[in-house]
Image: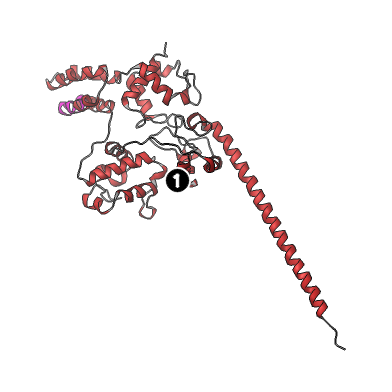
Amino acid sequence: MKENYDRYVFVGLLLTLALIIGVGAAFAQEDSRLKEATLKLNKANVLHGRQLYVDNCTSCHGTRGEGIVGPALNNKTLLAKASDEVLFATIRVGRPNTTMPAWGQDNGGPLTDEDIRYIASFLRAWEPTAPEVKVDVVEPSAARGAAIFAGSCFTCHGDEGKGTKTAPAINDVVRLKKLDNEWYRQTIANGRPAKGMPTWGTVLSPNQIEDVVALLNAWRAGERVVPETTVAELLDSALFSLSQGDKEDAAFYLQRGKVIAFGPALARFDPIITLVKNDNLNQGLTDLGKLRNEWPIGDAKNGATIYSDACKGCHGGDGQGGVGRKLKPNEFIQQSNNAEMLQLVLSGRAGTAMRSFSGRLTEAQLADVIAFLRTWQP
């Protein structure tokens, strides 16, 4: 007699089905637990990043990321364009020639790489609800671009882009006409790692990249571009030339300085130029030295307004300090001449939140701020 196995097969199928359903349910439950754990971890990262942001970033970027001294970070356009890598690199190494310092410990800052990732996570959490922020349009300047090129690009590409053994000449009309501005814009921002070209988008601001593109555009047209300079730099060059007995160069730098000079000190250029041209070099050197030490002379009333817009976020509206040092009163200001004050503000202080204001405020605006700070001293 043959035994009927059908019912055993049926029971086996039922058990197999139950096992599959059970395992599937377990996986689904585990997947749900993983998602929940990930959400909790992300939330914890964002909360930790928020605290780090409050402790380190609000004085420049605002408690809600609205921007004060620094730009608005709670900005849909910025967050959409900036990858997590760009956010991380910008916080870690800062942006040269801006008020954004390097926060990474490897670059002299207080934050670990993990801290920086927490802050980047917090900033990214703003993106879904971030408002569109209207950004001031800055007209690109080939002269500013030449100054940036001289400070950042000439090491590889040579003086005035004439090339070196490391990189080819970029100031080449034929070469420049083969590729458009957008290609150069993207190359500067993203680099060409295979060719040894670094990623400058993590170092230069978008406006600075546009200035460099404006320089390339001018070179494409066969123009020679003189780097943007300050009266202070031209006075330094004139003073050095005159101390070496080179009156022609001294007169040249003084003439250039006179063109962009401002304020009551402008009237002192012509008499010094006359002394130099008439070979009265000793008196010219004395008068030029005095002018250099006193330059720039600004307007304290205008300086109060500029200070409120650009400096109080770090130094306080009453000059009593915060992230930045106390300025009312301040021993350095009392002991320094205007030239030394200007150099500090233009160069910043390495390893601190005080970064260069070169390119952010004009020399005339800085002169006004210095004049205003003088009113706070005894």
Residue 113: tell me if it is visible. Answer: no
Quarter occupied by residue 145: top left
Residue 167 location, x and y as percent?
30, 50
Q: Reply above or below: 164 against 279.
A: below
Residue sitting at x 63%, y 42%: 44
Q: Is residue 273 above or below residue 124?
A: above
- Check if residue 253 falls in the magenta segment: yes
Q: Quadrant of the N terminus?
A: bottom right
Q: What residue range appears in magenta? A: 242-254
Residue 345 point in image, percent of width and height: 38, 26
Residue at image coords 48%, 30%? 60
**Numbered disc 1: secondary structure:** helix
Badge 1 local density, few (<14 within 10 Å), some, or many (20+)?
A: few
Of all residues, the one furthest to the bottom in this rendering is 1
Q: Nearer the viewer, residue 236 or 218?
A: 218
Magenta-span inclusion, residue 211: no
**Residue labelled with disc 1:** 81
Looking at this view, is 228 or 240 the one in front? 228
Q: Amino acid at mark 1?
A: Lys
Kindly tell me whether residue 18 is visible in this rendering.
Answer: yes
337 left or right of 350 in image: left
- 107 left or right of 247 in image: right
| As drawn, 36 above or below 230 | below
The residue sitting at the left extreme is 278
Q: Quadrant of residue 112?
A: top right
Residue 103 in picture, x, y percent from top left: 49, 36
Q: Is residue 298 left or right of residue 323?
A: left
Find the residue positioned furthest to the right.
1
Q: Residue furthest top?
A: 378
